[in-house]
Amino acid sequence: MDIEPVYLLYGVVFLTVLLLVEGAYYFFIESALMKRRTNRRISMLNSGMQGREVLELLRRYPAGRTGAMNALTHPLAYLDALIAQSGLPTTRLRMAMIMLSVTVVALVTLQAAQHFGRLPTVLWPLPIQGGLALFFGIMLPHFYLTHAGATRKRKFGQQLPDALDIMVRSLRAGHPINAAMGLVAKEMSDPMGTEFGIAIDEMTYGLEMTEALENLNDRVQVEDFNYVVMSIGIQNETGGNLAGVLASLSHVIRERARMFLKVRSLSSEGRMSALLLCALPFIVGGFIFASTPEYYISAVDDPLFVPILGIAFFNLVMGIFMIYRMVNFRF
């Protein structure tokens, strides 16, 4: 018995929505639940899991730094690095399924907009719609992974001075560096506690301390933590007052953070103005298109429409870039 094409389309849409809901669950709900836990590694160990099993579930293998990696020439390694930096409990296969689901949903949305006459004629060809759908399917999960990685990196940087203070007190009490790191893994919340716990487990199962710390540094990619890794590595080879060095690093990191927050507070008005100025063209354009779509659709067929739109978009991007450089400061 032949199956009608419309039923095949219904099946594809159903499967796509199902995968999209599953992806949204793992991205938003499960990640939010894990954020509420004090320490994901401690919670897994308390639930009865073995240390080796916990290590295999939590350890991620970033293939180098994303900044020095081209997403076009090494897409799989780039995706692995983004997942590792985000700290999300997901895999490369699951991310590919989410990207495919978002692509199909975007394509179905464009087709529906075309059917109801809400899509400009320039976007009617199927290859253009497929390209736009593929763009959204790849970029939306990419933006989410990048945002999650940046949030996790910022929180790790905020926790770093407290972690160094714990290590300093432990070292001054006479404990070895392994015990000081283990205390951080036990007492600190995520992401600091889990990341140090992964390093401790790696050392427990045969990895050298410097190599475990380098792996931790590759996962979090916090600039201040580079100095911690170098200090511990030098002390491990030559000896010295590691507690004093870590105490000085904690003081310097806190002073830098205090200065950064002071600058942000002084520039808050300019950043808010920049945000409104950058968002205003998109808000006004979206409101006009939603209320009277003929205002833009009637001019789409004009031969000057695309060149003028390209020039306006280029000027808008350059203006946003200049405003961003004016209200953001690097230390």
Image (cartoon, rainbow, N blue to C red):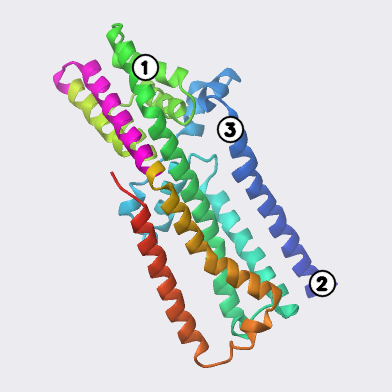
147 vs 159: above or below: below
Name which residue type carries label 1. Answer: Ile
Of helix, strand and loop, which mostly describes the magenta segment? helix
Task: Quadrant for residue 241, please give it.
Answer: top left
Q: Are marks 3 and 1 in contact (CB under 8 Å)?
A: no
Mark 2 or 1 closer to N-term?
A: 2
Q: Residue 166 — which label?
A: 1
Mark 3 or 1 closer to N-term?
A: 3
Position of the N terminus by quadrant = bottom right
Q: From the viewer's side, name the closer residue of 239 and 35.
A: 35
Percent of width and height locating residue 185:
43, 21
- Residue under label 2, please give it: 3
- Judged from this view, the residue extending furthest toward the bottom is 303
Stretch in magenta:
237-264
Name which residue type carries label 2. Answer: Ile
**Which SS class for mark 1?**
helix
